[in-house]
Image (cartoon, rainbow, N blue to C red):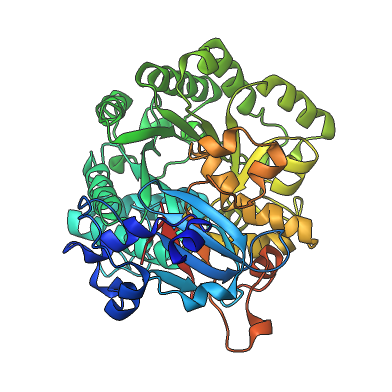
Amino acid sequence: MAQAFLATHGIDLDAELAQMQSPDANPQFAPNPQALATQSSAPPPHPPPSTSLSILIRNVSLPSQPGTHDVTLNPNTGKITHIGAHDSDIAMLVFANQKYGNGALLAPSLCHPHIHIDKAYLLSHPLHSKHQIKEGTFAEALHVTNLAKAAFTSEDLLERGQWVIDESVAAGVTHMRAFVEVDAIVGLKCLEAGLELKTQAEGQGRMRVQICAFAQLPLFSDSKTNAWSEEAEFHDPEAEKIRALMREAAANPEVEVLGSTPYVEADDEKARRNVEWMVDLSVELDKHLDFHLDYNLDPSQEPLIHHVVATLHAAHWTEKMTDKTIVIGHATRLTLFSTQEWIDLKKAIGDLPLHFVGLPTSDLYMLRTAECTRGTLDVISMIREHGLNACLGVNNVGNAFTPQGSCDPLSLASQGVGIYSAGTVEDAEVLYACVSTRAKAAIGFGGEAEKGRKEAEMREGGIRVGDAADVLLFGSEKQGWRTRKSVAEAVYLYDCYRGRRGFLGGKATS
C-alpha cells in the first residue's frame, strides 16, 4: 500500500530502499529500520553506486499556483518527477529524504548570466586594497584594475573567485557565466584559475560554471591610441598578442564562451573589426558569444549593435551553430532609442538567438547622468513592448567598476521594482525570471522541456514535471505570514538570502 501511494508521487520505493541499504548511501538519510520493516519484508536488491535518493519537498508554494504542493526531485534523471497538491497523509510514511517547506516558495533557481569572478572583491582583498576609488570614473576603474591585474597570483584569484561561488551558492545560484580576462597583463592566469574553480564547483555538485574567455583590452588598437587607457605600460603594444592568447583560450574545450569589449578600441573601424574577428572565431569553434557593447549615453555615437546583428547574419550564425546564443551586455546607448528604433532592431535581429543583459548596479554607478535618468537597459519594456530577450546580471562586486552590491541576483530584481517603476505582481514575476529562467536561457541553459512551451510559460518561471530539477526553496519564518510564499513577495521583500536552499539536478547544493 505504501509503495502504491508513493508511486503516485513519482517515487520508486524499491529503488529508494535499495539505495538506503547501500554502503554508499548518505548517512544523513539513514532510514528507521523498524518502520522500513513494516513497509517491505523482502530485502531489496543492491543498487548501483550511482543511484541517489529522490528528494520529496513537502508543503511548498509554487509560482502562480494556488495552495501548497509536494514536489519530487529525481537526482538520477536531474528532473522534477512529480508535483501534486500537498497531502498531509504522506507524513505517516517514513521516507528518508524529505524537506519541509512550511508553505515557503519553491521557484526556479537563480542564475548569473554575467559576472566577473577574476575582478571581484579587489577593494577588500589585502593584496589589492591599496587601490581605492578617488574619482569614480570608468578610466580610473580600468586603470586601478589593470594595476591589480599586474599583481594577480593564482592563490589570490582562487580565493576571490571562491568567495563569489560561495556567496552565490548561498543565494541559490545554480548556473553562472564567469568572465575571466585574457590579455598580455595576466596571460592565461585568470583562465586557469577559472577552470580550476569550475572543476571544483561542478565536481561538488554546487554549481554549473560556464567559463567565458574575455578580452577586456583592445584586439586591434595600439594601446597608446586607446581612448580608454591612461597607462600604456600595462597594455600589450601589439594587439596581435591578445588575439593569439584569445585563440589559445578559445581552443580549450572547457571554455564555452568567447567575449570582448569592442568599445575600448581606438576608433569605430577597429571596433567593427573586433566584432567581426570575434564572430568568425566563435563560428569556427562553435562557442557562445558575449559582447560588452555600446557602453555610453552619447546620442551622437552610432550604436554598434547594428553592425553586430549584420555580421552575425552574414556569418549564417543560426544555420551554422549548435544551440549557441549571443549575449549583449550593458548596451546603455540603446536606452536613448525611440520606439521606431526598437521596432527596427527587433526586425533586424530576426531569428538570431540574441539576448540583452542589463547590469544596473554597474551602469547606474558609472553612467547615470542628469540628462539620462535611467542609464541602464529597461528590461521590462524590452520584453513586454518590443518582444526582445532580456535579463539582469550582477557584473561586478567589490571593485572600482562596481564597489557596491552582492552576489545575489535576486537583489537586482528587488531593486528593479524601483529602477523600472515596476510594482505589479506581473512585473515582479518578469523581474524574477530575469535573474532565473530568462538568465539561464540567455546563456544556453533553457533546457529541452522549455523549448516546447509557449513563450510566456517558459520565460516567466513556472515549475512543471519534466523540468530540470534546478530549484530554490526559500526560508520559512516562525510567523507563517512572514514567509515568502509568492514570487512577488520574494522580489518585493528582499530576504538577504536567509534560509534559502538551492538544488541543482535534484541535489542540494549546500
Answer left or right for 402 relative to 380: left
- What residue occupies the far left of the structure in this picture? 23
Residue 207 image-quadrant placement: bottom left
Answer left or right for 196 relative to 40: left
Name the residue rendered at 31%, 35% in the picture: 255
Name the residue rendered at 74%, 35% in the picture: 387
Residue 185 image-quadrant placement: top left
| The one of 365 and 63 positioned closer to us in this rendering | 63
- Number of numbered tags placed on the structure image: 0
Residue 388 drawn at (x, y percent): 69, 35
Name the residue rendered at 63%, 67% in the picture: 61
Name above or below for residue 340 compared with residue 419.
above
Name above or below for residue 395 compared with residue 278.
below
Residue 441 drawn at (x, y percent): 55, 40
Residue 450 drawn at (x, y percent): 58, 38
Answer left or right for 435 relative to 469: right
| The one of 181 and 428 positioned closer to us in this rendering | 428
Residue 171 drawn at (x, y percent): 47, 66
The answer to whether residue 420 shows anywhere in this view is: no
The answer to whether residue 93 shows anywhere in this view is: yes
Name above or below for residue 470 compared with residue 26.
above
| The one of 281 and 67 positioned closer to us in this rendering | 67
Q: Quadrant of the C terminus?
A: bottom left
- What residue occupies the far bottom of the structure in this picture? 479
